[in-house]
Amino acid sequence: MGDLGVLVAMDPVARGSLLGIANVLVIALGIAIKEHGGFEAFAAMSIIGALPALIAGVLIGAIAAATPRWSIAMRRLVLITPALLIVIGIGTAVGFDMYVELAFLPTIAAALWLERSSRMPELVPAAQAR
């Protein structure tokens, strides 16, 4: 399965929690670089964002686990929307609302990957010889 094999094999809730943490690390890194904050700024934002990211990842992963047979478009909507609302809420609450739109990029990528990796595979009929 390659290096991502363990992540792909996880259930959607565990995968969502891991993606939530990874997302906050990417966002913290981007803000720290933009603000020239260095490692201290990155560490502070990562620590502050870790618990909300973990909770959000678990909740969104639970939604993914509960909807594997829904249409792809509907699943994307129900996974991306709460993720973006959480980013808006946290970004506004901590005074980083100027970075909310930038934080949408890794958040949408994580939600889309969660959707794709937890989707019920298409049922393909067995080949028949005629």
Image (cartoon, rainbow, N blue to C red):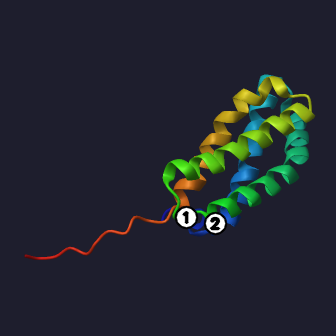
Callout 2: SS: helix
Q: Which residue is mark 1?
A: 68
- Tell me the residue at 87%/39% (across/down): 45
- Tell me the residue at 77%/44% (across/down): 24
Q: Is residue 103 visible?
A: yes
Q: Which mark is residue 66?
A: 2
| Residue type indicated by callout 2 | Ala
Dot 1 and dot 2 residues touching (CB under 8 Å): yes
| Residue type indicated by callout 1 | Pro
> Image quarter for residue 36?
top right
Q: Which mark is residue 95?
A: none
Crowd rating for badge 1 (residues with CA inside 10 Å; few <14, some 14–19, many 20+): some
> Would residue 108 appear left or right of 38 to someone viewing this image?
left
Q: How much space separates mark 1 and mark 2, taking CA atoms?
A: 6 Å
Q: Is residue 3 visible?
A: no
Residue 49 % position (x, y): 86, 45
Q: Is residue 43 above or below residue 72?
A: above
Q: Is residue 72 above or below residue 129?
A: above
- Tell me the residue at 87%/53% (across/down): 51
Which corner quadrant holds the C terminus? bottom left
> Would residue 67 appear left or right of 125 to someone viewing this image?
right
